[in-house]
Amino acid sequence: MPKISPELLSVLRCPVTGAPLVQEGEELVAALAGESGAAPRYAIEDGIPLLLPPELLQAATATGTDQHDSASGTSEAP
């Protein structure tokens, strides 16, 4: 399990609640609960925190996140 450095954790905030994040295993958890009453949780993949709310993370992975146009070999504008 990759451990997120204390320096990085000191500046990261939950994008939903604005609360500090704490590492619990393979996830970062907001120190405050969100609108649902539960604290938002964010996966850590290959040592990189994925700080998208779950519904946006599902949409991003469903559509793909590569911004390169494979047909023309050019990059799309962000």
Image (tube, helix red, strand yellow):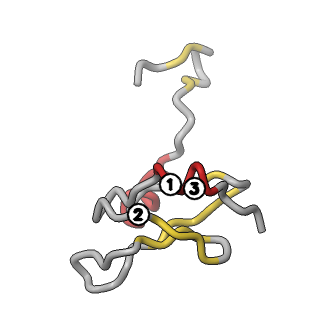
Residue that label 1 marks? 10
Residue situated in front as seen by the camera: 12 or 41: 12
Distance (Cα) linking label 1 and label 2: 7 Å
Residue situated in front as seen by the camera: 75 or 24: 24
Name which of mark 1 and mark 2 comes first in the sequence. 1
Q: Relative to residue 49, is residue 71 depicted above or below?
A: above
Name which of mark 1 and mark 3 comes first in the sequence. 1
Residue plotted at (25% across, 82% down): 36
* Residue 78 screen position, x and y as percent: 40, 25
Place residue 68 in its image quadrant: top right
Kindly indicate whether the residue at mark 2 contacts the one at mark 1 (C-beta within 8 angstroms).
yes
SS under mark 1? helix
Q: Residues within 10 Å of mark 2 (few under 14, many from 20)?
A: some
Name which of mark 2 and mark 3 comes first in the sequence. 2
Residue that label 2 marks? 20
Q: Residues within 10 Å of mark 3 (few under 14, many from 20)?
A: some
Disc nearest the viewer among 2 and 3: 2
Residue that label 3 marks? 49
Amino acid under disc 2: Pro
SS under mark 2? loop
Q: Which part of the image, by quadrant, shows the N terminus?
A: bottom right
Distance (Cα) linking label 2 and label 3: 13 Å
Tell me if 49 is positioned left or right of 60 in this view.
Answer: right
